Image (tube, rainbow, N blue to C red):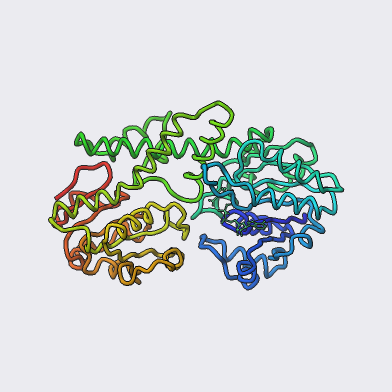
Amino acid sequence: MHITVIGTGYVGLVVGACLAETGHDVACVDVDAAKIADLQRDVLPIYEPGLEELVRRNRAHGRLAFTTDLPAALTDAEVVFIGVGTPPGSDGSADLSHVLAVAEEIGRHLRRELVIVIKSTVPVGTAARVAEVVAEHARFPFHLCSNPEFLKEGAAVEDFLRPDRVVLGVESDYARSVMAELYAPFVRTGKPILFMDIASAELTKYAANAVLATRITLMNELANLCERVGANVDHVRRGVGSDGRIGPAFLFPGPGYGGSCFPKDVKALVRTGLAVGAPLRVLAAVDEANERQQRVLFEKVRAALAAADVPLEGATVAVWGLAFKPQTDDLRESPALALGDALLAAGARVVAHDPVAMSAAKRRYADRELGDRLRFAPTSYDAAEGADVLVVATDWNEYRHPNLARIRAALARPIVVDGRNLWDPAKLAALGFAYYSIGRVTAR
Ligand code: NAD
């Protein structure tokens, strides 16, 4: 099939490359000319394991192309995916301007019967709006389809190639059969394609993120409670997760969820609920609790330094991890940046390390005149050198088993705030660290 994918971000690029991998002819379109120029020479704008190889191979075989020319890319298209961003608007609702702009373009340049697939995460009712906009301009029949994406950054290629399920909201047999054919190679192990109405498909994406964000947030609040009552959240987590009705996934406490999806999708779903008179009170509380949790690392650093009689202003804080989670360079809503911003505002110095997200972080802070108050270290041990406290903000694998004696020697003071519970409190205490983690009693 001839397929066009609009938007070459984390989602669009993965979708385009994976569909090309199954033999389709895919044109990926973006308005960002610099990004497209890079992609045309196999330079990827993002870090995503396995993606570069996929792009390289499919481009070399002529199945994958990148362009800014949407009308040209639509000429032969039988299916078009809309994968542009839907960032939060000022009131928390999803900003649909990119999606609707693309819809108008598609309507204007449609040249044959087309399946229009909304991949972006959009509130219920958006497909209907897109259909209206396309219909205003279109001279050919089209079929709208909602196909929310469930990939996880850091494992996006794997998730797309082997999804747990594919959700397809369709309203015509034509769209149903085209999409079933397109997804057949990805569900060969018996994973389901769940066909449903479009509104249900649109809502399913938000509902899934709402459930996951709620689980994390509940565990974070239970971890905070553990600290107050002298319980250990590791034990509680295992005890809870062993229940077959609950399961062990997504119960790890930490410094609040981040990323480009959970915070914005939770807020957007809360807005939808309010707008239609079906308030999502639990989810509103999740959003609020998470914003508070994003302060937890800063509060722990402040308390740890105070306990050691070190003023926060002027203290040097080593921060391990900047991305909102491992295996990605995505900094959007990262708890590590919330920490960094709070530390800098309080007059501390920050020395940061991240295996892949440092270039993105340098760009984010480029317009702030911070001098040497913010530095990026080439290795994690360099970051620790001479610091008053070390904070683990992202659970990268390479931070799991470091040489603790070397860290002890590098730090000016043996203070660690482990925001991901990577290390063993007893071991750290035995090595002479003051060790603070999440939901476990402080070891000294
Ligand atoms: P992104 O910001 O990484 O990429 C969006 C891309 O769309 C950018 O390259 C931008 O230049 C391009 N774009 C914007 N307007 C355009 C236009 N008019 N024409 C062509 N290109 C245009 O976003 P993302 O993370 O890939 O997310 C895209 C959508 O998928 C969002 O709705 C998001 O909620 C959803 N989603 C994201 C993830 C994820 O893990 N990132 C997972 C599932 C769903």
Q: Is residue 358 visible?
A: no
| Residue at point 41%, 41% (across, down) | 250
Is 367 or 204 nearer to us in this picture? 367
Up the image or down, 143 lies above or below 52; here it is above
In depth, the one of 123 and 319 nearer the eye is 123
Residue at 55% x, 65% y is 45
Q: Quick check: 359 above or below 25?
A: below
Indicate the position of residue 102 as horizontal and vertical percent values.
70, 52
Q: Residue at x 62, y 40 (%)?
A: 190
Which quadrant of the figure contains the N terminus? bottom right
The residue at 80%/48% (across/down) is 114
Say whether residue 16 is left or right of residue 312: right
How many labels sit on residues? 0
Outermost right residue: 139
Q: Position of residue 152 (x, y in %)?
A: 51, 50
Q: Which x, y percent locates residue 156?
A: 54, 53
Kindly tell me whether residue 40 is visible in this rendering. yes
Residue 409 position within the rendered picture, expressed as x and y whole percent measured from the top left = 18, 67
> Quick check: which quadrant has ligand 1?
bottom right
Residue found farthest to the top: 277
The one nearer the camera, 9 or 333, is: 333
243 shown above or below 413: above
Direction from residue 413 to residue 8 in the image, left or right: right
Question: In the rendered view, does 310 fall on the left or right side of 15?
Answer: left
Determine which quarter of the picture holds residue 66: bottom right
